[in-house]
Image: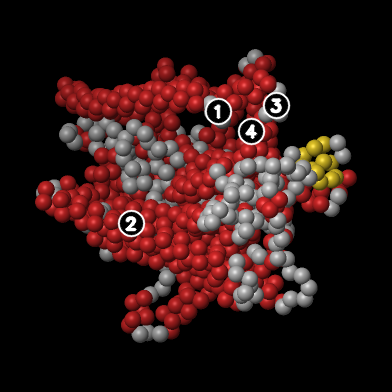
Amino acid sequence: GAMGGSASLIPRDLLGEYQELTFLSKQEILLAYKRFSELLPKEERENACSVRVPKSQILTLPELRANPFQHRICHVFSTSETRDDSMSFEDFLDMLSVFSDSATSDIKSHYAFRIFDFDEDGTLDRKDLEQLVNCLTGQGEESRLSSAEMEQLIKNILEESDIDKDGTINLSEFQHVVSRSPDFASSFKIVL
Amino acid sequence: EEPHGAAPVGFLQELPSCQSARRRRGGTQERRPALLSTAGSRGAGTLLQDADDCPAREHPVCMAEKRRIRDSQQADTERLSRWKKWRRTSSKALKKALSEVKSLSAYLVLWRHDIHNIEGKFGTGIQSYFSFLRFMVLLNFVIFILMFSFVTLPTVISKYKIFNSTIVYISSKNIEDICTIYEPSGNKGLVYFYIYLKDLLSGTGFLEMTSLFYGYYSIDAVSISIMNYNFPLAYLLATFAYLALSFLWTLKRSVEGFKHNLVHDADPFQSYCNKVFAGWDFCITDPSAAWLKHCSLLYELQTDLQEEKLKQRIAERRMKEKLRIYSLRIFINIIVIAILSGCFYTIYRVTVFSQENSNDIDNANSQINLLVQYLPSMVITLANFVGPLIFSFLIRFEDYTPAFEIKLTLLRCVFVRLANIGVLLFSLWSQISHCGSDKCKPCGYNYKLYPCWESDVGQEMYKLMIFDFIVILAVPLFVDFPRKLLVTHCSCKLVQWFGYKEFEISDNVLEIIYGQTICWIGTFFSPLLPAIATIKYFIIFYVKKIVLIQTRKPAARPIRASSSKFFFLVVLLIGLLLAFIPLGVSIASIPSSKACGPFRNFNTSWEVIPNTVLEFPTGLQQVLFGMASEAFAVTFFLILCIIMFYIIALAQAHKRVVEELREQLVLESRDKMFLIRKITEAQR
């Protein structure tokens, strides 16, 4: 069947290597390969392992199309030198590995921090938090919090998580607050 | 508070703490050269050490980097001693084998695909309900296997004389003959078909003689070739085993993945960070579900912010206001207690009526008899339905914050559902031990009406379970489906105001817990009840799935705490602990029936254990009896108290240290900013 066909397209040692370097099981890697090659046009499916898929194609995946953080996810996991957020198969596997069930919470919180850091300065400051909340509540104008509510919300968030009171949340503070969050492990998960 | 932008960013990025954070981050390509040069003497050594500590896949870097780390780890392994090399390779092989086993066992998981689809369409809140259903199916199946293999299987083997086994009947001398008369009215001769149906629904007639009920197991020991199987002891120990298993399994699941912060008093479910950082379900695949999620997140955040303002207002209440509110609350609580008492009294009277009239031979075969037998179940279901409505109406007057309102209503609903079962059992016992005119003297219980009272209790539990199942099947079919049709096709204003039914998670969970408590209490009196429960929950999964897909409207106010896994399991534990009480009373204090069951030769069911202990060697006997004595209990209790006080003191000391460290961190951060600004000024 389809599974058998794709198994023959990933060489055995590469499959073993992927199993070792990610948190995915063999079936999950094969399924990822199948879904990744479906994003490519027919001619390029043969060497799917070395081709880069443009961002617009990646965003057609059902797991990402409804996600408000889709652009950030593509940007964080893409290793493209031309910075066009295109993803290779290995980037795709990296992404699925972080979002899988068996990934450690350390890794998940690390990448969550990078995804939420919209301006990529290494900390979550007020602007990042504002953008984060706007992503959560929806894109329309009527689905945003008023500026007074936003102020209050950001003040509460910083009060809970900013330990050294410098007005920003750095990585260790983020990891600390997320480790106490009961819903994080179950919500930060994508399974194909 | 000094603004962050005042100090130049360049300096901050050279600080050692920032370097180590970036190293853990794994940085992008261009920053690497800077990292290597400024890391200096710490760089090479610590990088290597970092790589050694954990496998390559736990590093948050891209695939190419992970390959490099793994290669350098392997190069290291070459240099290590043989012992360390062997240890490392064997641990790797072990991890690989474990992951293979795990991936294989993932295929055995029940309903994996269905639950995955539900998660994608409706989010993790609703998915947690269906995972909970799956857990119930598994739990009941395991309990069934336990009871079947230790209780039913030996009985069946010995009754049909398989494996050369025989039943051993031990007759005891000091039982009055009158207590041992038991003639269940199994159907003899030609009867109408509907009698069979009636018996199936009420557990009487032909069903009473089957292995479903306690009365079938009237054997004292089973001997298979040379082994002697102490059946009463096995029955009692199997009961304790399934209770302990349920307790431990539920406890294990509720502790998994939940790290409660014991130092700060903040409620982890109400925390804003939890709602914002863990707010989005990344598994949602359906755009309409995503839109619903956006709306509900917006609503939740706005409600919480308003609630905070409300709390401030509450804190500023004056004394007169407070007095008014408190007296109103006390009044409403009295009303609630009055309603509950009325409810309990009704159940008591109905049970007594039902018991008296169903034992009446005259209308033993009419349809009314079935109705009378089901009367307690119907009243309980009605109370379970009406109670929450009344509570949610009354709580509006008590002026609590919305989150607390929901919690309190839930607590009251849970209490009503579980207490109803308790009242039913209590009224049954009062009937069984009702010694009006010296009826109980010979046997200790009312032997005329209840020669085999455990079977009767088992029948009541069986009826409760069947009726619960019928209601869960009938309500979607006869209430929700017509309602949906009406709302879709009729545009009358009243009907539109009624609206679609929401998929209310907390109501559904309470239904399950009510059913499971019945099962736990009933399994002692009816060992095959868990099998019925397994089938029941199996069917309910598909029914609820269809209801959910048809409704397409998750609740508008998803309260995080009430839809979380933790809430389900805590309420399940409450149900289990409340189930211990009736079982404890039945086993230890009510005399077991002398006409049927494995405990005919004992005063109470519990007596098996002391009798068995008396057969142990003297030394062991003394130890065990010593453990049950008062001296030991008091000493044990005192030691537990001392340990508890010690741990509380330790926790308070830790809390103080954490507070001090937090203050110090804030001061250090300010110092850092100040110094950096001074350096920048000095440089200019």
Do pointers 3 and 4 mark residues of a single chain? yes
Q: Are marks 1 and 3 in contact (CB under 8 Å)?
A: no
Which quadrant would the C terminus of chain B be assigned to in this image? Answer: top left
Q: Earlier in the sequence, mark 3 or mark 4?
A: 4
Distance of label 1 from label 4 (alpha carbons): 11 Å
Q: Sequence order check: which comes first, mark 1 or mark 2?
A: 2
Which percent across, then down, holds residue B120?
50, 59
Which mark is in front, 2 or 3?
Answer: 3
User: In the rendered structure, which amino acid carries the disc numbered 1?
Assistant: Ala
In the image, residue B9 above or below residue B232: above
For image coordinates 47% across by 74% down, the residue present is B480
Mark 4 sits on what residue? B610
Q: Residue under circle 3?
A: B616
Q: Nearer the viewer, residue B35 or B109?
A: B109
Residue at image point 47% right, 22% down? B635
Residue carrying label 1: B628
Crowdedness near tag 2: few (<14), some (14–19) or many (≥20) residues, C-alpha within 10 Å? few
The amino acid type of the residue labelled 3 equals: Phe
Chain hosting mark 4: B
Comparing labels 4 and 2, the label whose residue is closer to the camera: 4
Left or right: A130 as drawn, with respect to B360:
left
Q: Is residue B585 visible?
A: yes
Name the secondary structure under disc 4: helix
Q: Quadrant of the N terminus of chain B?
A: top left
